[in-house]
Image (cartoon, rainbow, N blue to C red):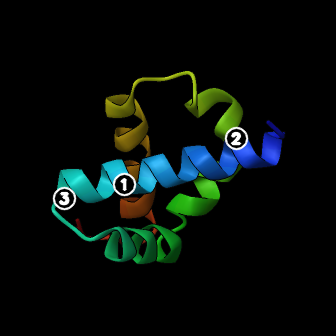
């Protein structure tokens, strides 16, 4: 599997886990994460983030989104 495909798959899983945690649809979660730079963070930090637990990954994304104006 190519590196790009791994990053895409990882991003999809992160969006779905974020949606589940906050009781959002996948579309709502993606829009929130895109708007507040969570998607960009996932892609840019894939090498480190994919080695962590999903609890830690979601914490990292939440902190970043809050810094960028997110309110969840």
Residue under the point 51% across and 60% down = 38
The percent position of residue 70, horizontal first and vertical second, equals 34, 70
**Farthest left residue?**
23
The percent position of residue 50, horizontal first and vertical second, equals 57, 30
Q: Is mark 3 in CB contact (under 8 Å) with mark 2?
A: no
Q: Is residue 62 above or below residue 40?
A: above
Q: Is residue 68 above or below residue 55?
A: below
The percent position of residue 7, horizontal first and vertical second, equals 68, 46
Q: Of the residues under marks 2 and 1, which one precedes in the sequence? A: 2
Q: Which residue is mark 1?
A: 16
30 vs 5, nearest the viewer: 5
Query: Could you tell me how far apart the alpha carbons at marks 1 and 3 are, in whole angstroms?
Result: 10 Å
Q: Is residue 32 above or below residue 51?
A: below
Quadrant of the rendered structure where residue 37 is?
bottom right
Query: Could you tell me how far apart the alpha carbons at marks 2 and 1 are, in whole angstroms?
Result: 15 Å
> In what element is the residue under mark 1?
helix
> In what element is the residue under mark 2?
helix
Question: Which of the numbered marks, if any, corresponds to residue 25?
Answer: none
Q: Is mark 1 in CB contact (under 8 Å) with mark 3?
A: no
68 vs 26, nearest the viewer: 26
Residue under the point 45% across and 67% down = 33
65 vs 43, nearest the viewer: 43
Query: Could you tell me how far apart the alpha carbons at marks 3 and 2 are, in whole angstroms?
Result: 24 Å
Q: Is residue 16 left or right of residue 20?
A: right
Question: Which of the numbered marks, if any, corresponds to residue 22?
Answer: 3
Q: Nearer the viewer, mark 1 or mark 3?
A: 1
Image quarter in which the N terminus is found: top right
Q: Which residue is mark 2?
A: 6
Q: Of the residues under marks 3 and 2, which one precedes in the sequence? A: 2
> In what element is the residue under mark 3?
helix
């Amino acid at each position: 599997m190519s590196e790009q495909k791994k990053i895409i798959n990882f991003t999809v899983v992160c969006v779905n886990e974020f949606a589940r945690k906050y009781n959002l649809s996948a579309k709502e979660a993606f829009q929130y994460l895109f708007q507040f730079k969570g998607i960009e963070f996932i892609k840019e930090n894939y090498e480190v983030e994919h080695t962590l637990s999903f609890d830690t990954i979601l914490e990292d994304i939440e902190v970043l989104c809050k810094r960028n104006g997110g309110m969840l």
